[in-house]
Amino acid sequence: MKKFIIIIAPITVVIWLGMNMLFLNYCRDQYNEIQKKRLDIVVNYASDAAVDELVINTADLDLDYADFERMAVEPSIALDMFSTVFLKSYGMSMSRENYIDVKTNYIPMFLVASYDGYYVGEPTKINTSGAHDAIFSIKQPYLYRDGSKTYALNLGLTDAKLYDNDSLQKVEAPLSREDQREIINSNVSDAIMNTVYKQTDENMLATLYVPSKMSTIARTNPIDNVTVMAYVTGLNTGYGGVLDSFGIGGSRVTHENFVGCYIKDGVKYYSYMSKIPSTVDVLVTYENPIIAAENGYYFDLDNL
Amino acid sequence: MRNAIIGTVICFILAVVCLVVTPMYYIGIIEWARSESEVLSDARNLIDEVIDTRRLTEDMLADFDLALAAKSSYYRATITREVKVINPDPANPGQTYTNYIVMDKMDEWTQGDLIIVDIENIGTNIFRSMARIMLGMNIMDSDIRLVGRVR
């Protein structure tokens, strides 16, 4: 009997310890999974915020559908807004150092797809003493080569720019809409993968691919409007895991929220037009708050 | 005889730890993980409603509080509205600076505002509490904070 206990007791303890070890593993996985879910939500909201801010702050107001081609986007506005939401979600202050930290350490790839090209932002060394900042590339066209002809496609999918070694001209789109979508998406996918591969020193945690057709499985849309895509990586959880996440933000048609300017008690104020009471004499209206502030008007906190 | 008593006591303690405290801890962690991911979904629902409708009504708040109260852990949520304010920079005329100001008025939101939902874990579920009281077993906790921009 005694011999039996001497054999059995250590086995029991070992099994118990082993179970604890397994459970510790499970615990860590659970914790990482929750943090991953949270990061996904944060990145999703951040890219939505970025694309909205981008469309509102850089759209030309004289724009109608005939001028859609001239719509310019300023990608650094999107990256700033993305970083703001990201910083606030992780409880960090909005200081310049924190912005640089987020842009250079956690966002290896930030892509803004606009009407006729895309911008890729990546952390770049800006001097020899080790300073980095996120720098955007020049606008890259959606290229398509057919023999000696080079086409630049756009998101309108009806026409294209043709370059045949001596002239640049506007022609009808050379391909069907589906094929053009496929080429635009593969251009963007390649740019994403290239940048991530370069920035993460070939230690990628994931492979990113933007499908060209609407897929019901992954529930993603092809790029058919101004889009922001961001890849976030390098975020540590407490248990030694590294998280990464990928967010896509698509824009939609919005209307401008005009601001009206007036003088109250001798101070120049502006406020959103829908909030200004009818008794106030509006002197001038502007397209967005930035222009109003540039002209010396202060935000009126009483009208909200 | 004395040895037998000591052995019995040690065995009893071991049996309690193995058969009572550890399973409680395990169950506690599993429950905690589930409620944590449910809370994330609830916070996300609330933020989605606010950023799409641009208002925060009593009904939405009541729904959210009810959802938090139904979890096995105890949570306290704080909702903050931050208004984006762009003012002229007095030092450099013609330039602007941007900051976010916390607002008390919560019913009507404007485009560009930020909604910040802070969810604080103020109490654990009963299994984890018992495991902590009996053996001091605990795990790392972190508060949840989500931010959305009103569209």
Image (cartoon, coloured by chain):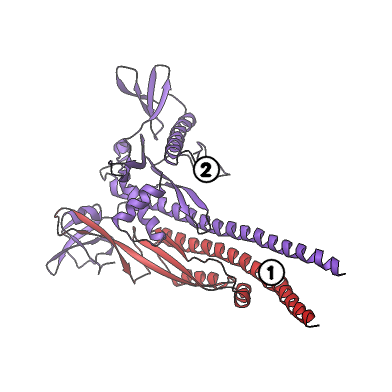
Chain colours: A purple, B red
Residue labelled with disc 1: B23
Q: Secondary structure at mark 1?
A: helix
- Which sits in the foreground, A222 or A281? A222
* Tags 1 and 2 touching, CB below 8 Å: no
Q: In the picture provided, is A137 more to the left or to the right than B49?
A: left
- Can residue B150 be seen at all in this image of the molecule? no
The amino acid at mark 1 is: Pro
Q: Secondary structure at mark 2?
A: loop
Q: How many marks?
A: 2
A243 up-or-down from B45: above or below: above
Q: Residue furthest front?
A: B2
Tell me, yes or no, whether dots 1 and 2 are on the same chain.
no
Residue at x 71% of width, y 64% of height:
A16
Q: CA distance from mark 1 to mark 2?
A: 36 Å
Residue at x 48% of width, y 49% of height:
A245
Residue at x 36% of width, y 66% of height:
B81
Which mark is in front, 1 or 2? 1
Query: In the rendering, at what x and y percent does residue B14 appear?
Result: 72, 73
Query: In the rendering, at what x and y percent does residue A253 appear?
Result: 37, 47
Residue A174, disc:
none
Residue A262, image quadrant: bottom left
Q: Badge 2: how crowded within 10 Å, few (<14), some, or many (20+)?
A: few
A266 up-or-down from B86: above or below: below
Query: In the rendering, at what x and y percent does residue A280 appear?
Result: 19, 66
- Which sits in the foreground, B128 or A246? B128
- Which sits in the foreground, B121 or A115? B121
Q: In the picture provided, is A51 more to the left or to the right than A20?
A: left
Query: In the rendering, at what x and y percent does residue A270 appear?
Result: 21, 61
Residue A206, disc:
2
Q: What chain does mark 1 sit on?
A: B
Residue A164, image quadrant: top left
Q: What chain does mark 2 sit on?
A: A
